[in-house]
Amino acid sequence: QVQLVESGGGLVQAGGSLRLFCAASGRTFSSYAMAWFRQAPGKEREFVATISSSGGRIDYADSVKGRFTISRDNAKNTVSLQMNSLKPEDTAVYYCAAALGGISNNPNWYEYWGQGTQVTVSS
């Protein structure tokens, strides 16, 4: 069982930066692939980024490549998402997710989810 708690969301102007954090409970965090998804009002949940259990494999949605960076610290049971050059279309609730096994951009792959943190980018 893994419990996930996101933090770091907020309001930022276009072009600005935010760093999201996801703190995980449990002693087996290093066994889980982690991911960030986001959901804007009236839209489906969308893949943002994922990182393998060791951190050796990473994948990003095309819409965030070159602007967002996912990383993890297995010693601290945390995963983060550094978001730079933010755009109004990045506005959404951002969710952290965990899955045993490899990485995936499919939300159905992930077993555990956090409660989400709101990111709002003003133009």
Image: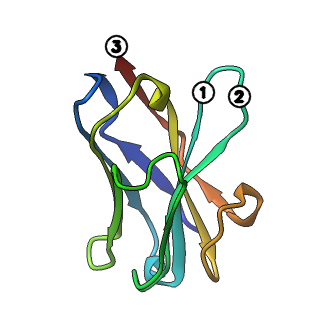
Neighbour class for label 3 at 10 Å: few (<14), some, many (≥20)?
Answer: few
- Secondary structure of residue under mark 2: loop
State the CA–CA distance, disc 1 to disc 2: 5 Å
- In the picture, residue 23 is in which quadrant? bottom left
Where residue 71 appears, as percent x and y from the top left, is 33, 67
Q: Position of residue 78 (x, y in %)?
A: 34, 64
50 relative to 21, above or below = below
Labelled pair 1, 3 in contact (Cβ < 8 Å)? no
Classify 37 as above or below 78.
above
16 relative position to 45: left or right:
left
Q: Helix, strand or loop at disc 3?
A: loop
User: Disc 3 marks which residue?
Assistant: 123
| Neighbours of disc 2 within 10 Å: few (<14), some (14-19), many (20+) | few
Q: Are marks 1 and 2 in contact (CB under 8 Å)?
A: yes
Identify the amino acid type marked 3. Ser
Q: Amino acid at mark 1?
A: Ala
As drawn, 122 above or below 7? above
Quadrant of the drawing holding the N terminus: bottom right
Q: Residue at x 73, y 35 (%)?
A: 44
Q: Which mark is residue 40?
A: 1
Sequence-first disc among 2 and 3: 2
